[in-house]
Image (tube, grey):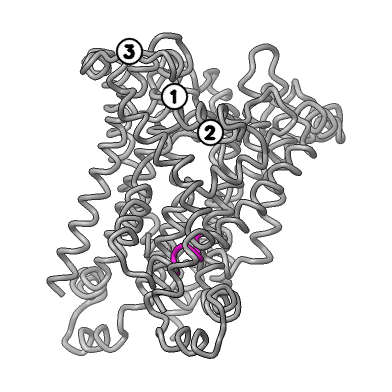
Amino acid sequence: MERTMKKYFPLFVMPTLMAFFIAFVIPFLMGLYLSFCKFTTVTNAKFVGLDNYVKAFSNKGFLSALGFTVLFAMVAVVTINVFGFLLALLLTRQIPGRNLFRTVFFMPNLIGGIVLGYIWQAMINGVLSGFGVTMLMDAKYGYWGLILLMNWQMIGYIMVIYIAGLQNVSGDVLEAAKIDGAGKLQALFRVTLPMMMSSITICLFLTISNSFKMFDQNLALTGGGPSGKTTMLALDIYKTFYDKVGFEGVGQAKAVLFFLIVAGIAMVQLFITRHREVES
Amino acid sequence: MRKKSLSNTILFLVLSILAVLFVTPIFFVGMNSFKGRFFISDRPFAFPQGELFAGFENYINGVERAEFFSAFGWSTFITVFSVLVIILCTSMTAWYITRVKTKSSEFLYFAFVFSMVVPFQMIMFTMSKLADSLNLNNPLGMLVLYLGFGAGLSVFMFCGFVKGIPLEIEEAALMDGCSPVKTYFRIVLPILKPTAITVAILNAMWIWNDYLLPYLVIGVGTPYKTIPVAVQYLMGSYGAKDYGALMALLVLSVIPIVVLYLFCQKYIIEGVVAGAVKG
């Protein structure tokens, strides 16, 4: 069978492979190389060694964006997972209309980041105008605005994954715990949660990596303002590339660092998942 | 029993309040889309009536200024055809590299998986330059770019499923004289259908809402703007901002998604869960 199939390599694999080279492999390798160059277009690149990386770190924008992103991720990850889990717990009980509730809570997840960002910009500015301020007057409004937006978008998504996890927790084990005299809270913390560790790992990493990679919502809600204080990593890279001429190399170096952070998060996730699979 | 139904009633009330809070932003935007543009920032929570009511003025402005119908058309074109191309090409590739076990298949699989963890910002500059020089900066070229950048996740998901299909079925078909192409279309693709639906949903959600790739590759100076690009173009440009037109445009952008969601809810939620668990 393998031998007959091999003849069909040009038909089965070539189209995907060519597109993959154009849209990923070549740009990725070029990007890696260009992060060590000074350039304005791809053709006039001049090798400058680690210069761009030194500039990326001495540039205040990158470190403050990193700090803001970490601060954002910490609060967003905790709130989204706690609220998502609570909703999942409630919506796996026998409650009238629970399918309708699930539908409503999940819906914001389908709306794109740009549209979401402007919906919330209008809403938050509407509320703040009652106090005579706008969102761009203080970075704290933008920060909490982003947290609120991200919660609104992701709670329903995280909720459905937790619901799927909860439905896998066997009723027999819970029954046994109840007979052994476990209270409701005890059953939740000692039985349900440990049995859901794989769902929890998935949700934690989904929220962490989505928080780190956030771009559209950031661009639409605050655009990074006031004076760049609510700029997250992805937006900072974008601005380094396209807002001023002559910093393309620094932008590419920041992009490589960004890639290393995101890939690092994925590696940790992989390690934890594998580790747990071996244990169980 | 009575105690239980009481606690359920309370829960029901709490959830109802939460649900209302969840749809408030959308209602807020909907309400303001019918107000005169200057009342939106002055009286954001007032109901659109009397002098505040502006009829469909904002909608007419929004559709005109953002060329909404053209954007809707291009968004639909790019999303539908990219998803079809992705499904067809990546399922073939996944079948091939799972069945033909060579060093290069293994390496390809690794490369596809690797591409999943690379954020778009890493390649955005070089990819848009390359796309320009290859004349891919048009809606048809976008199909190639989405196939290439979306291949990682799709190949990965199809491979996971192909591994579970018993080899005997395909071998029997080949022995009966089916060519690999026929075997693929008659045997493999129908078996792959559930995974194909999941892959289609995940890719459609990504491509429909994607902003940066079409913005960088196609840009705003062309008639091929997609919906996210058109929305950002209306608001991101300098000068007097028409919030009335924006509100109307936001409502128009949300409607198709909500309608589609109400019809294919089951598939969408299942697809998203399956995608999260495997990805």
Magenta-span inclusion, residue B92: yes
Residue under numbered circle 1 = A238
Above or below for A189 versus A243: below
SS of the residue under disc 2: helix
Chain containing mark 2: B
Above or below for A144 versus B23: above
Q: Which span is picked out in magenta?
A: B90-95
Q: Residue at x 44, y 43 (%)?
A: A21
Which label number is shown at residue A276?
A: none
Asked if disc 2 and disc 1 are in contact, CB closer than 8 Å, the reply is: yes
Q: Amino acid at mark 1?
A: Tyr
Could you say where residue A210 lies in the image, as x and y percent from the top left?
39, 44
Marks 2 and 1: same chain? no
Which label number is shown at residue A46?
A: 3
Which label number is shown at residue B212?
A: 2
Q: Crowdedness of circle 2 by 10 Å Cα count: few (<14), some, many (20+)?
A: some
Residue A113 located left or right of residue A140: right
Q: Amino acid at mark 3?
A: Lys
> Where is residue B59, by image quadrant?
top right
Q: Amino acid at mark 2?
A: Leu
Q: From the image, which quarter does the N terminus of chain B lie in?
A: bottom left
Q: Residue at x 52, y 77 (%)?
A: B188
